[in-house]
Amino acid sequence: MIIYVCSAYSGIPGLNDNREENIKAAEDICRFIMKKGYTPFAPHLLYTRFTDDDRPDQRKAGIRCGLEMLSRCDEMWVCGKKFSEGMIMEINAARRFGINIRYFMNRLPEVLEECLEL
């Protein structure tokens, strides 16, 4: 099963705008998903390696590619208590694609472990 990881990257104004912290959280979530035997897909960890998220044209291209891959995923895991603009766009796309969405209020794998019955 391929799990699309939906979590903040650049941040949520006034809540969490620490990009490095967000990247670390997404990496931890991906490791957790792999540990469970699934395949994680986190577009914000992949496309930002060769695009500049601070440039609107490159951000738009990365989002387009991420949404194309979302259409091929089995499930989306939304991690965090608040949603960024990009996360909302991804959630709406998952709904349009009919992809099952699971919401986790905390982004830490040890808390995810307690929430899941896998």
Image: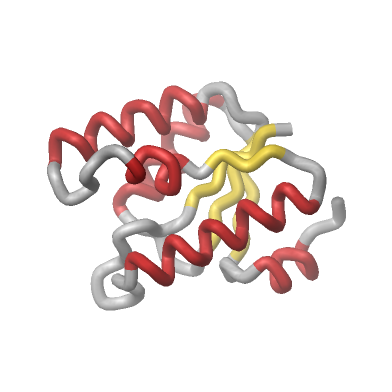
- Residue appearing at x 33%, y 47% in the figure: 86
Nearest the viewer among 78 and 20 is: 20
Q: Quadrant of the N terminus?
A: top right
Residue at 60% across, 31% down? 99
Q: How is the image coloured?
A: secondary structure
**Image-based side of 2 in relation to 105, left or right:** right
The spot of residue 107 in percent (x, y) is 57, 67
Outermost residue, right side = 118
Q: Residue 82 in the image: x percent, y percent?
A: 42, 66
Q: Where 93 sits versus 38, above or below? A: above
Identify the residue at horizontal 55%, vertical 53% (top origin): 78
46, 67: nearer the viewer: 46
Residue 9 located left or right of residue 27? left
**Viewed as shown, does residue 69 lie left or right of 102?**
left
Q: Judge from the rendering whether residue 34 lies leftward or rightward of residue 30; answer left or right.
A: right
Instruction: Give the tally of numbered discs.
Output: 0
- Residue 63: x and y in percent read 32, 35
In the picture, residue 19 is in which quadrant?
bottom left
Q: Residue at x 49, y 26 (%)?
A: 69
Furthest residue to the bottom? Answer: 14
x, y (%) of residue 76? Answer: 59, 42
